[in-house]
Image (cartoon, rainbow, N blue to C red):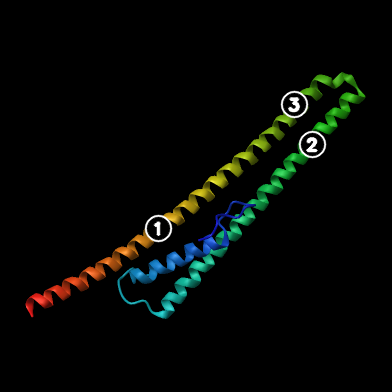
Amino acid sequence: MSNGADSETRTPSPEQRAEIVVRELERFIREGKTANTGKKKGVSFRSWQAMAKEEIAQAIRAARYVKFEEERTKRRMALVVAVCMVTVGFWATTVAIDRNYGPVAAVLTGIAGLVLLAIGAEWAIRFAVARHMAEERTKMLTAIDDLDLKIRRMKKELEERKTEMEAEIESDGG
């Protein structure tokens, strides 16, 4: 299993995305249902191939969308920071040149400072939420692996028990 999300972005790592795709394909094969009808029947190679292509394409689209959203957010934040810094600089210069506009400059500089503080708080909150989501995703994948392992063990035990019971029935009846 992977070691978690990307350390920089806190989005699912490629290994996590691959794990999710593999689990979807495994579910598709085990359930033996076609993607369109949902009826039980054998899974042909072409159906499996189409399902695999679709799952992989969805994972790639999701990764691209997350990257796009991160970049767009960063650009917007940088623009707002730049505007606030220009505002602070302009009004600080105004105060330095002429003390007549001091109160107006102080209010506008204060507002720009509050906006910068709000941006910093939003970045901190986004980082904390992304880290929490990555941890939860990792926990869920670990729990799924554990459950899958338990199911395999139980299946093996049931097969062994079935074999023992069949042997016992044959020895009693024969």
Left or right: where does residue 99 sit relative to residue 36?
right
Q: Dot 3: within a 10 Å radius of its alpha carbon, few (fewer than 14), some, or many (20 or more) residues? A: few
Q: Amino acid at mark 3?
A: Gly
Residue 136 is marked as none
Question: Quick check: 131 above or below 160?
Answer: above
The residue beneath circle 1 is 146
The label nearer to you, 2 versus 1, is: 1
In the picture as drawn, the residue positioned furthest to the front comes out as: 171
Left or right: where does residue 105 sit relative to residue 19?
right
Question: Quick check: 129 above or below 94?
Answer: below
- Residue 44 in sight in this render: yes
Q: Quadrant of residue 121?
A: top right
- Residue 35 in sight in this render: no
Does dot 1 land on a helix, a strand or a loop?
helix
Does dot 2 land on a helix, a strand or a loop?
helix
Q: Residue at x 87, y 19 (%)?
A: 100
Q: Residue at x 31, y 75 (%)?
A: 41
Left or right: where does residue 11 sit relative to residue 25?
right
Does dot 3 land on a helix, a strand or a loop?
helix
The residue beneath circle 2 is 85
Q: Amino acid at mark 1?
A: Asp
The residue beneath circle 3 is 110
The first of marks 2 and 1 along the sequence is 2
Residue 80 in picture, x, y percent from top left: 73, 40
Q: Amino acid at mark 2?
A: Met
